Image (cartoon, rainbow, N blue to C red):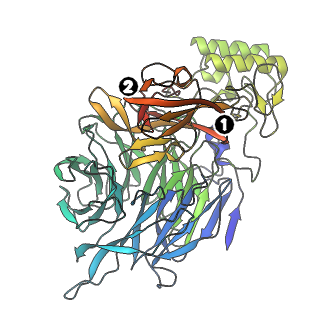
Amino acid sequence: MTSVRLVVPLLAVLATGSVLGRPGTARGADCLTSYDVGVSPNSLAVGDFNGDWHPDVVATNRFGPHTLGHQVWIMLGAGGGAFAGATAYDAGDGPASVAVGDLNGDGHLDLAVVNSAASHGPTPTLETVSVLLGMGTGGFGAAVPYSVGVNTYPDTVALGDFNGDRRLDLVVTLSSNKAAVLLGTGNGRFGAATTYVFAGSQVGSVVVGDVNGDGHLDLIAPDYGDNAVSVLLGSGTGDFAGSIVLPTGTDPVSLALNDFNEDGYADLVVANSADNTISVLLGTGGGHFNSASAYPVRTKPASVAVGDFDGDSHVDVAVANSFDGTVSVLLGTGNGRFGAEHAYAVGGAPVDVAAADFDSDGRSDLAVANLRDSTVSALLTVTTCVEATPRLCVGDCHNDSAVTVDELLALVNIALGSASLTACPAAAAWVDRSAYPEISVSRMVKAVNNALYGCAFCAPGTCRMSGDGICETPTGPVGNACCWCGYDGWCAFHCICASPDTPIATPIGEVPISSLRVGDLVYSTTPFGIVAVPVRQVSRQAVRSHHVVRLGLATGAVLEISAGHPTADGRTLGELRVGDKLGDTEIMSVQVVPYTHDYTYDILPASESGVYFAGGVPIGSTLKPR
């Protein structure tokens, strides 16, 4: 059974900063849909399991009878933020945590699942992590268990290439402060577990990332026994030696890794269950972090995720609050700071949250595991279920659907610094969002055009391509046909260049560019060599009547990218000819072909160069830091 609630749009709250309901109460969200997934879901992961470019969700059921509880449930995305009914697969006894990745190198996503219900005591049974190989159709093969010892009480699982062989490995946290690492062979099988000890006394979930910038993946875990984050430093050979301990709030239980101040260094956000806060620790390089900054959320935060929920290209934070049935969203400013939390009602006892763009609108949405309701909730930031896009008119200071000369003068004074935003009361809804909101030149141009031609209240799917006052469907000449209609009625972006299946080099192997999200690790060129860095920005834009360059490389790889896309050495793809070199690889064929996909993609790594590797060759990014 699927239940649907349509209430106040989430995007309207994010865009206007308006408060819904009484102060201090949870706020509604647009198109909150709940899906039945067995009994007591407690862990989530997201991936495209059937190759249709719609994100899917997998949830574990740790508790309940075997017929409902000891399984993983797959919810296949149907597009537009909707999901098909969930399908269950046996994973083992008491599946407690799930991670997603291509474990056998066949291009299909697989599952790794920790099982927590082994027998303990004088006659214990083996504790295991199960591997379910994906078929590429949304289905999975039988679970294959791998031992992580006896009486080890496994808790969570994560994936990464710990020994640099481009094959995914597994890490499983064990009681009380240990981690078991199983190195992958590349065919979906794994070697015997090797156990490592964290410096902390009681670790919970584990996250994989490079916290000290040496190009090797480390293990990062919240340590609720010592109110800290504990880090095991990776050597790049599959071993872990050396520790970092970072103080947090009280009883940290979940964390996420990203670049919150856009300086190229890994930062941390941690959910603290006892003092109802999140801690943000900004990295300064070399494994060093500033002292934690605390931000209040709701009661008993249990899980934290990151994404871009308001479309400003800055990383935001979402927190599942297990005691009051809400998710808190804190919007990032791009400088490492976050605004006050907005809380949205979900289900009973939300214990895990994951972020992904489920409705393909360029903004992150949320999936939430509700332990008490036995459901997974999908919480969308933008949807066509109701009119979700607020009618915002750039330059209209008084919300009367017109822009006057006096209002334009007020904007000029704000831009010059001789007046504050209070001179234009409605400006907070459409100024350039940053730590220091400002009236930019582009906003002034839109305001002038709105004064000349009227406010740009265009029909859904149409917007102003220029300042002529005409609302039109995004179309145009070859190479300039991409546009996303922004909330202010204007064309916001143009073509972002790469086809969705463009293979991007990451620590877990090559993955399609369309599957990358902010915070994922990709290889980039830095002054220290080629290292894995977080993705700072991602973009996915609709395209019509577009042509691209199809490059055949000597390695056998084929790339389809727009002609104007930059190479790593300052050329464009359209300049390349047969026999030229792209990186160290010779170009064997060059064709200009019609583009057959609906969207183009690009990413911006958090490195000074902005270079990433597509099909094994270095290319630049069309995106700029914001």
Task: Name the quadrant containing residue 532.
Answer: top left
Relative side of 17 to 42, left or right: right
| Secondary element at tag 2 | loop
Q: Amino acid at mark 1?
A: Tyr
- Would you call the spot at circle 1 few (<14 residues within 10 Å), some (14-19), or many (20 or more)? many
For the residues carrying marks 2 and 1, which lies nearer the camera in this image? 1
Choose top left, top right, bottom left or bottom right for residue 3: bottom right
x and y percentages locating residue 205 in the rendered image:
34, 60
Q: What residue is pinned by disc 1?
A: 595
Single out the residue that lies furthest toward the bottom. Answer: 123
Q: Is residue 20 left or right of residue 417?
A: right
Q: Position of residue 91 (x, y in %)?
A: 43, 75
Residue 37 seen in the current view? no
In the image, what residue type sits under mark 2?
Answer: Glu
Looking at the rendered structure, the secondary structure element under dot 1 is: loop
Residue 47 visible in rendering? yes
Which residue carries the number 2 mark? 608
Relative height, residue 168 to residue 294 (above, below): below
| Sequence-first disc among 2 and 1 | 1
| The quarter of the displayed image where residue 92 is located | bottom left
Mark 2 neighbour density, 10 Å: few (under 14) some (14–19) many (20 or more)? few
**In the image, residue 300 lies at what x, y percent?**
43, 60
Q: Is residue 156 left or right of residue 436?
A: left
Location of residue 323 with respect to 307 vertically, above or below: below
Residue at x-position 40% and y-position 51%: 277
Q: Nearer the viewer, residue 268 or 143?
A: 143
